Image (tube, helix red, strand yellow):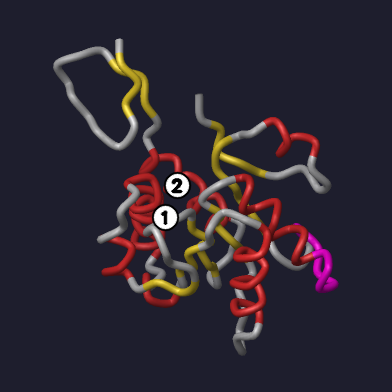
């Protein structure tokens, strides 16, 4: 038995997380709620990055979790006829400061997102905090879906919608 992170080997039994399918489910949920202006808050994609990323930068990400989750989001967007380039991807350092910085950038846009796909619950909770501090509420003003299913997401205010992993 092996724990598979970012790699698949069908020759041995393994436990892993299907980041592509999980992310696709998250995006599909928000799309089914009627959202068309979405944004992605990413986990680390490189050793030094932070800020908005292009599709090619995401596909070249050092960390497979970030890349695979973006691919899953994009699959749902493609299926709904939403152009990938209309959904900005922002890399965070998975901390409060970088998440708040990209949230400020994201909401300075003329048409900010109505829904956010966060690649981790930790990032989602930092984003919800920023939204609260800026006078916005979840889910009334902005919908949010996290990823991981960390215990804190169940007791967060408001409770976080998340994709739970084993």
Q: The magenta stretch spans which residues?
A: 132-139
Determine whether the residue tagged by mark 2 lies in a helix, strand or loop.
helix
Q: Residue at x 56, y 47 (%)?
A: 120
Q: Residue at x 70, y 51 (%)?
A: 125
Magenta-drawn stretch, dominant element (helix, strand or loop):
loop
| Mark 2 in CB contact with mark 1 (< 8 angstroms) | yes
Q: Toward the viewer: 21 or 11?
A: 11
Instruction: Out of 33 and 53, give the one closest to the viewer.
Output: 53
Residue 139 in the figure: left or right of residue 119: right
Residue for badge 1: 73
Q: Name the residue at 65% across, 85% down.
A: 108
- Label 2 or label 1, whichever comes before in sequence order: 2
Spatial distance from mark 2 to mark 1, Cα to Cα? 5 Å
* Foreground residue among 160 and 9: 9
When the figure is inspected, residue 165 is found, relative to residue 132, above or below; the finding is above
The part of the image, by quadrant, that contains residue 22 is top left
């Amino acid at each position: 038995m092996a724990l598979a992170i970012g790699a698949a080997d069908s020759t041995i039994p393994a436990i892993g997380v299907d980041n592509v399918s999980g992310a696709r489910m998250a995006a599909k949920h928000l799309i089914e709620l009627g959202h068309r202006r979405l944004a992605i808050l990413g986990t680390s994609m490189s050793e030094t990055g932070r800020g908005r990323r292009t599709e090619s930068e995401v596909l070249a990400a050092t960390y497979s979790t970030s890349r695979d989750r973006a691919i899953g989001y994009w699959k749902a967007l493609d299926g709904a006829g939403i152009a990938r380039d209309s959904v900005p991807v922002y890399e965070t350092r998975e901390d409060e400061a970088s998440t708040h910085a990209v949230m400020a950038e994201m909401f300075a846009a003329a048409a900010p997102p109505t829904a956010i796909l966060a690649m981790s619950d930790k990032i989602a909770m930092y984003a919800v905090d920023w939204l609260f501090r800026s006078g916005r509420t979840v889910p009334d003003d902005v919908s949010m879906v996290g990823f991981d299913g960390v215990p804190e997401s169940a007791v967060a205010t408001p409770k976080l919608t998340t994709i739970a992993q084993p």
